[in-house]
Amino acid sequence: MNPLVEFNLTLLLFLPWFAILGVLFWVYPRRPRGMRRVLYDLVSLAVSVAAFMVSIYWAQTSADPVHGHMWQQILATAVGYGVFLAVLGAAFVLRLLILRPRD
């Protein structure tokens, strides 16, 4: 396998699922939808993907090769997915608190 593809295999496999989660994050809740919300959502999605990338590269380089070459991909997948969900979940909760409609 091409080393570049192998190193980014986790990202390639998760892109469709991240697209689904990103669309759901973007769409719900439907209101309020202003420039602040759009900017917040874009930054949140970018930070989530960046945190995912950093975590998978860290996990691949930190995995012990004694346990086999596949362990690097398994560890990167588990860590990266958890980090992506944690950042996106925190952004969702913060969005509800920060951008809630003022009464």
Image (cartoon, helix red, strand yellow):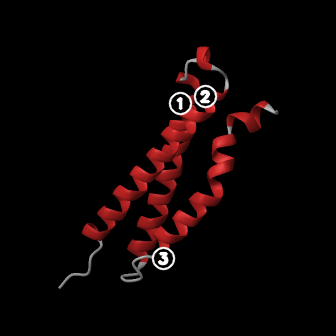
Q: Residues within 10 Å of mark 3 (few under 14, many from 20)?
A: few
Checking the image for residue 27, the label placed there is 3
User: For the residues marked 2 and 3, what is the alpha-carbon distance in whole angstroms?
Assistant: 34 Å
5 and 65: which is toward the camera: 65
The residue at which mark 1 appears reads as 59
Q: Residues within 10 Å of mark 2 (few under 14, many from 20)?
A: many
Q: Earlier in the sequence, mark 1 or mark 3?
A: 3
Residue most toward the left? 103
Q: Percent from the top left, x then y, of residue 76?
A: 56, 35
| Front of the two marks 2 and 1 | 2
Q: Earlier in the sequence, mark 2 or mark 3?
A: 3
Q: Percent from the top left, x then y, of residue 12?
A: 69, 48
The residue at which mark 2 appears reads as 72
User: For the residues marked 1 and 3, what is the alpha-carbon distance in whole angstroms?
Assistant: 31 Å
Checking the image for residue 15, the label placed there is none
- Residue type (three-letter) at the residue carrying disc 3: Val
- Residue type (three-letter) at the residue carrying disc 2: Gln
Q: Percent from the top left, x then y, of residue 89?
A: 38, 58
| Side of 98 where 20 appears, left or right | right
In what quadrant of the picture does the N terminus appear? Answer: top right
